[in-house]
Amino acid sequence: MSEKPPVIAVVGATASGKTALGIEIAQHYNGEVISADSMQLYKGLDIATAKPTPEEMQGIPHHLISVLEPAHACSVAQYTDMAREKIAQVQSRGKLPVIVGGTGLYLDSLLDNIQFPDIPADAALRERLQKEAEIRGNAAMRERLRGCDPESAERLHENNLRRILRALEVFELTGIPLSEHARRSRSVPPPWNVLRIGIGFADREKQYARIRLRVDRMLEQGLTDEVRGEFLSGRRRATAAAAIGYKELLPWLQGYETLETAVARVKQETCRYAKRQGTWFRRNPQTEWILRDSDCVECGIFEIAEKIVAKWNGL
């Protein structure tokens, strides 16, 4: 048994069921949940970001949900600082930290104990890169990044312009690719004994069907009213443009297209996001996978998770 304190992480794509499993694990092993979701950090858009309701939490304390104002941009380094503090607080109460989420970069940075270099932002350089992106487009900026940091360019989707520009900024400021900074940042082992449990699907179409049903439930819960209220409020939030379910409904709110068309795009973009999440998480060989559509035919997801935990023997 490891001398390091245990941490269990439940990871997977959107609509995989990781929230429910994380809560069950926390109930069974005297734990508290710490979110690793880049959208749920922010106040508002509760339905669009699929925050667990008080009923779903079943009395289990949840951390790092609705803790930031919408206008505040949270970096990966800031998230890991907050999450490390929460892990320490949970452990000080004699509880098991259960990390639950689908933001792969947040999860890997936290669980691998990435030490972020202190490279301050350069406002003038960032403005120049931003203007260049407006002229040339996201794809061109990603190709530019490929010339100086091919690893980061391969890892980042072209829609993730903020991180593409940050990687270019880091290279111009230091002359060292962000990917090399990342390698150097892994020199300090994590202070915890970590078990990663992933939830996925052997048949991706079954996953997509689950996502489409989930979007329908979100509409029944009042997604359109939530997005309308956010839009009419006039608030400018750092996260709204990235939250699937918000930006796809704006053309409908503005009268440019039908609700049916907008909802179809919500479902399509959510499926695409889930595919990218799955690709990210499958790269980690340390993850113990539960496949909902094959492993769970004769028993429940938690029963399989119990066997994984018993085999791990980290508690």
Image (spheres, rainbow, N blue to C red):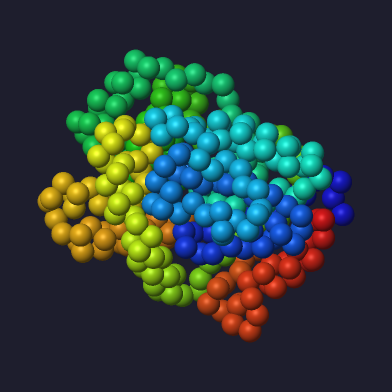
Q: Residue furthest left?
A: 256
Give me the residue at 25% from left, 27% from top: 132
Residue 171 coordinates in the image, percent (x, y): 44, 26
Residue 201 coordinates in the image, percent (x, y): 51, 71
Looking at the image, residue 127 lies above or below residue 256: above
Looking at the image, residue 80 lies above or below residue 9: above
What quarter of the picture does the N terminus occupy? bottom right
Q: Nearer the viewer, residue 289 or 79?
A: 79
Q: Is residue 203 visible?
A: yes
Q: Is residue 301 left or right of residue 38?
A: right
Looking at the image, residue 233 lies above or below residue 208: above
| Residue 218, picture quadrant | bottom left
Give me the residue at 33% from left, 49% from top: 226
| Residue 189, picture quadrant | top right
Q: Nearer the viewer, residue 66 or 58?
A: 58
Residue 193 coordinates in the image, percent (x, y): 76, 48
Q: Nearer the viewer, residue 176 or 256?
A: 256
Q: Nearer the viewer, residue 206 or 303?
A: 303
Looking at the image, residue 116 lies above or below residue 278: above
Q: Is residue 292 left or right of residue 153?
A: right
What quarter of the picture does the C terminus occupy? bottom right
Q: Is residue 293 left or right of residue 302?
A: left
Residue 164 coordinates in the image, percent (x, y): 38, 35
Give me the residue at 43% from left, 70% from top: 210
- Give the number of callouts: 0
Q: Residue furthest bottom?
A: 298
Give me the residue at 31% from left, 41% from top: 230
Q: Is residue 145 visible?
A: no
